[in-house]
Amino acid sequence: MSAEGSGSMSFWAHFDVLRGVLFRIGGLITALSVLFFIFMPQIFDAVILAPCHDVFPLYRLFDAISGAAGEPFEMSLINTRLASQLSIHLSTSFELAVVTGFPVVIYMLWGFVRPGLYPRERRHAVRAFVAGNVMFYLGVAVGYFLIFPLTLRFLATYQLSELIPNTITIDSYMDNFTVIILVMGVVFEMPLLGWLLGRMGLVSREFFGKYRRHAIVVLLVLAALITPTGDPFTLFVVFVPLYMLYEATAMTVRPRSDEHHGQ
């Protein structure tokens, strides 16, 4: 028995439906890009540049934990290229539009492929859609509120020599901001990837238990690379969410005994 509607439409009918979906996606991203472009100065000051000031929530939290105010941290940026501010204005508006509109885009594409799936495949796809979006935005939040501020504060204050002052450009700042936050969003898809690999029979929960010690070493190295401050507390703060992500990935994969039982 074939999936619902799989043979009820011709190729060109499917193509027309897909074209309509792509037009709606393009319209959504364009509208969001224009909206973000209009409000980008306010977004830059209140959100994107917030880690440049010592009133950022993470810095205040560390001061509260230590019981004493840390060294004042204020970082200013410069622009060295004529068109940089305009290009960053445009590119950031588009990137924010894609990130915020991503769930709607996937939902639109889901409406196109849904008729061709079996009921069981639909249930799995819905779970993957919800879990993938939640984990992606959770990773973005961790990147913005934790990883990027720690990295920024260390790199902005690190000096090879006192004769070499740090002068940070807006291009450098945005490159690191975008990469770190999006990478954390992708990294937080690990549980979903583990679940998919588990469903395919490529990994089992025993795999994660067997290589747990190796994973701890790798995650510690990764945490040290992300925040090379030499501060054990900072290293611990970064390592904990990465390790919790590893354990969460393991929990999404069924034990091998359960796989054999289900066969």
Image (cartoon, helix red, strand yellow):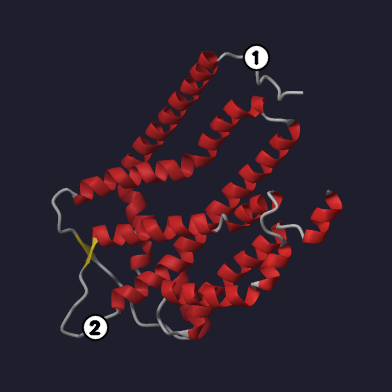
Residue carrying label 2: 160
Q: Which SS class for mark 1? A: loop
Snapshot quadrant of residue 72: bottom left
Q: Is residue 80 left or right of residue 141?
A: left
Nearest to viewer (mark 1 / mark 2): 1
Question: Foreground residue, 226 or 77?
Answer: 226
- Judging by the rendered image, the residue that carries numbered circle 1 is 8
How far, Cα to Cα, is label 1 from label 2? 68 Å
Amino acid type, residue under disc 1 in the picture: Ser
CB under 8 Å between discs 1 and 2: no
Residue 78 rendering spot, x and y as whole percentages: 19, 62
Q: Residues within 10 Å of mark 2 (few under 14, many from 20)?
A: few
Q: Is residue 238 above or below residue 198?
A: below
Hey, which residue is sitting farthest right in the picture? 261
Quadrant of the snapshot with the N terminus: top right
Give the residue displayed 48% in from the left and 76% down from the top: 221
Residue at image point 40% right, 82% down? 70
> Left or right: 87 with respect to 181?
left
- Quadrant housing residue 241: bottom right
Q: Of callouts 1 and 2, which one flags the residue occurring earlier in the amino acid sequence?
A: 1
Badge 2 amino acid: Leu
Q: Is residue 233 left or right of residue 253?
A: left
Q: Nearer the viewer, residue 247 or 61?
A: 247
Q: How many marks?
A: 2
Q: Secondary structure at mark 2?
A: loop
* Residue 36 visible in the displayed image: yes
Q: Position of residue 44 (x, y in %)?
A: 33, 53
Label 1 crowd (10 A; few <14 / some 14-19 / many >=20):
few
Residue placed at 64% from the left, 56% from the top? 194
What residue is drawn where x is 59% and y is 50%? 134
